[in-house]
Image: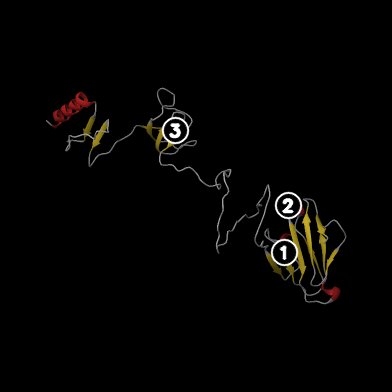
Amino acid sequence: MKKIFLTLAILAGIISSAQVKIGGTVITNIELNPSSLLELESTTQGVLFPRMALTSTTSPSPLAGQEHVAGMVVYNTATTGDVTTGMYANDGAKWVKMGAIAASNLYSSDGTLTATRTVTQNNNDLTFVTGTGKTIVNGNFKTTGAVYANVRTVTLAPIASDYLSSDQYVIIKVSGTANIALPDPTTNSGRVITIRNGSSQAGTSGAYTITVNVPMGSTSILINKAQTYISDGTSWYMMNY
């Protein structure tokens, strides 16, 4: 009897207004929303969309017509290429995962600023952890505030492997004279390092001599003096002031 009632209700809807309302086992409210073509009613059942294995967002496969159809909605069961399991809608040219949020930052892909952007730090630090990588500015770099360099004090004359990738200003405190080395210039092209003699020794006994990776003769740094070196990718060169 319920099935007969449901069938009659559907037929009546089609004949009278070309609208359809479908319920699970019984329709409790026969009225249709005037804006709906198809209305589903249930408190215990859902809608099960066609389940198929998509191959990529650009391929219409496995649709029977093998062409993109705008408005087509399916549940994808495959994880392959650039598709993962979930609901997909077709925009006429490709499959688009429903609920997916497009990346809005430059972390996962390249991008172009379309307008000036300002980051207000207040009293918060903004830290870039680069490891052995380099932060490259391919354009103009301008600062209106202080620029801080990493300053480190060492108590032993450093060898080439002792330098940190963040070292920009190294203060060496060693009693007596010492020979020190700079890191490999071939892996530090464009890098600038300033070394300061922070020894407490007086006169020449407090001099440090650069002996490695500098193309000129030994370069001494006297007590309480500093010297800056820059790498061209082949050697370190002393910068004269």
Q: Quadrant of the N terminus?
A: top left
Please provide percent x and percent y for residue 191: 73, 55
Numbered badge on residue 47:
none
Foreground tag (2 vs 3): 3
Q: Which residue is mark 1?
A: 169
Q: Residue 142, percent across and down?
A: 67, 54
The one nearer the camera, 103 or 161, is 103
Count of marks, rendered view: 3
Q: Nearer the viewer, residue 29 or 81?
A: 29
The residue tagged 2 is 187
Seen at 53% across and 47% down, the residue is 105
**Spatial distance from mark 1 to mark 2, Cα to Cα?**
18 Å
Please report whichever mark, 1 or 2, sits nearer to the chain's N-terminal start: 1
Q: As shown in the figure, which amino acid type bears the numbered disc 2? A: Thr
Q: Residue at x 82, y 63 (%)?
A: 210
Q: Provide the secondary structure element on which disc 2 rests.
A: helix
The residue closer to the viewer here, 229 or 11, is 11
> Is residue 200 placed above or below 71 in the rendered structure?
below
In the image, taking residue 49 as reference, residue 111 lies left or right, namely right
- The residue that mark 3 highlights is 95
Q: Secondary structure at mark 3?
A: strand
Q: Label 3, label 1: how many angstroms apart (C-alpha)?
A: 54 Å
